[in-house]
Amino acid sequence: MGAITVPLQSEPRFVSRLMARPTSAAGVIVLVVIVLAAIAAPLIAPYAPGKLSIANRLDPPGLEHLFGTDDFGRDVFSRMLYAARTSLSVGFAVVIFSSIIGIVLGLMAGFFRKLDTPMSRLIDAMMAFPDILLAIALVAALGPSAINVVVALGIVYAPRLARVVRASTLVIRELPYVEAARALGVPTPIILVRHVLRNVTSPLLVQATFIFANAILAEAGLSFLGVGISPDTPTWGTMISVGRQYMDQAGWIMMFPGAAIVVTVLALQLVGDGLRDLLDPRLAKDI
Amino acid sequence: MLRSILNRLLGMITVMALVVTIVFVIVRVTPGDPAAVMLGPEATASDIEALRVKLGLDQPMPVQFLRYVAGVVQGDLGQSIFLGQPVTTALLDRAEPTIFLTIFSLLIATAVALPVGILSAYKRGSFFDQTATTLAMFAASVPSFWLGLLFIQFFAVHLGWFNTSGYGGPGASLAVRLNHLVLPALTLGLISSALITRFTRASMLDVLNDDYVRTARSKGMSEWRVVLRHAFKNALIPILTVIGLTAALLISGAVVTETVFGLPGVGNLVVSAVLRRDYPVIQGALLVIAGAYVLVNFAIDMLYLLVDPRVRY
């Protein structure tokens, strides 16, 4: 039996509409470049990220070292490329993990009337904790590691997605096609996935883009504080944390990774804004 | 009115109870024995056992929970292992820089965001609007700790206008303490002004085209009176919401910013507690901050009732 859903826009048209907006197009292009640079890090990086060279310690940016060297004479540009891998994959993993929890909680709260009040209160309570602070506490309890940073931030951001999914589910639940599916005897789990979830994807995608941006900022914050990923692993946050001690003599060590965060997060926000205007016209208030 | 207040009050109490439960659970998700983790690898079995008894970890889980709740209700958040003082005292000792920082940042953020947001909406599409919108998006992408470091480098090291870090040491006068707060408050305030600016602009755009605004204009009212008295007043509710949200974000930002500027506040206390695995302190700080957030939100909901008589809960 074919699913009775509102037809989704075909993909090529959707992408071209997104790219027709100059700001969104700029965001997409910058993101693609950063992701490709991270993937191709071993090919692009002029030096190995951990290659020590005490003779070239704290070299300023130049032809030899594009973004200069750090306190161990390691090439800042090469380390930044490898750091992009960690920072981006942590951010992406947070999006996936929080989406899974958020979808399950949101569908349950939105679809089953009896569960709505208790689940909504739980979501409210979880949103009462400031993101970095809750993440710090969770990482402290679970132990510092990249995986636990993902788990902690996933738990932190899941309620935001749950809220979005719940709100859409409340509306979709009442639509005739869901009623029709129910009347035809379609089992509830199938209704949830095929009829409800498919139509929640638009607001979910918009929210997920912003969570990606927030997760990159939060991971950098945790790593900077020394309560996240181990300082030996290059991430943009740990690089800033190291560079901080040499701010006077070698500002470039912290300048470039910080700029990388700003550019990546800005690009994600531009894409998120574009997606919201295209997919969620109700929310598109010209912000 | 009374019914609305009671409804919100009931909702708030439920959320508070859940917050306490979450805080209790967080420390229990630690793999292994929290007492052993806190004391580190060199601890003897009898030390660990003694700490377990001291923390009540030897009791069954429901008993631990009831004890914890009973303590919280009486304002007892437990004992810090490393500081050797009650968590409540530790938090109170460090409350001032955090509270000042949050208030000043919020003031800066609002003082920047409201005029910029209103003017942006009023002159929609103008050069000013485009610049402000771009800057707001840019500010929302900057990590607060990084901006803080840049400010220290420029304003404190390069220009020598402010101190690089600290809070003036014990017994410093209020003026000295406030001087230490200028840069951190500027950092946090500018970053959080982004969100408020965007919402103020959007909210003003919503109302500027409404009929009553046109009517006010046609009556020959002065422009700024139309914008401020008629439009802004009606745009206020979403703006209030986002200011409340920002207050919560500021507390989160304060944790990181305090560390950058070496301010002896709650944020710094939490970070050092994490590094020392001082769980009671982490729990206490989480509870107080989340509780403050719930209360601020409740206060904002109550403000709605005053601002907009149509609001009912």
Image: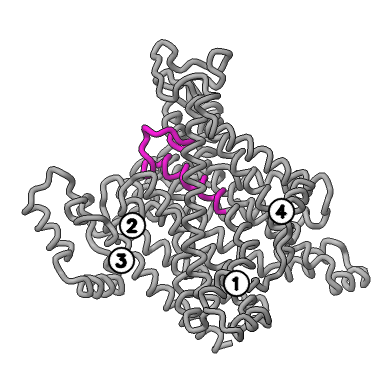
In three-dimensional space, the C-alpha distance between marks 4 and 1, rounded to whole angstroms, equals 20 Å
Q: Position of residue A251 (x, y in %)?
A: 51, 25
Q: Chain of mark 1?
A: A
Q: In this image, B39 relative to B161: left or right? A: left
Disc nearer the start of the sequence (4/1): 4
Query: Disc 3 to disc 2, how far (Cα)?
Result: 18 Å
Q: Which residue is mark 1?
A: A196
Are circles 4 and 3 on residues that touch, CB within 8 Å?
no
Q: Which residue occupies 43% across, 15% down?
A: A57
**The disc label shown at residue B24, or none:** 3
Counting labels gives 4
Q: Which chain hosts label 4?
A: A
Check disc 3 and give the amino acid type. Phe
The residue pinned by badge 4 equals A11
Q: Please check whether the numbered discs 1 and 2 fall on a single chain.
A: no
**In percent of the image, x 61 and y 79: which residue is there?**
A173
- In this view, which residue lies farthest toward the front? A1
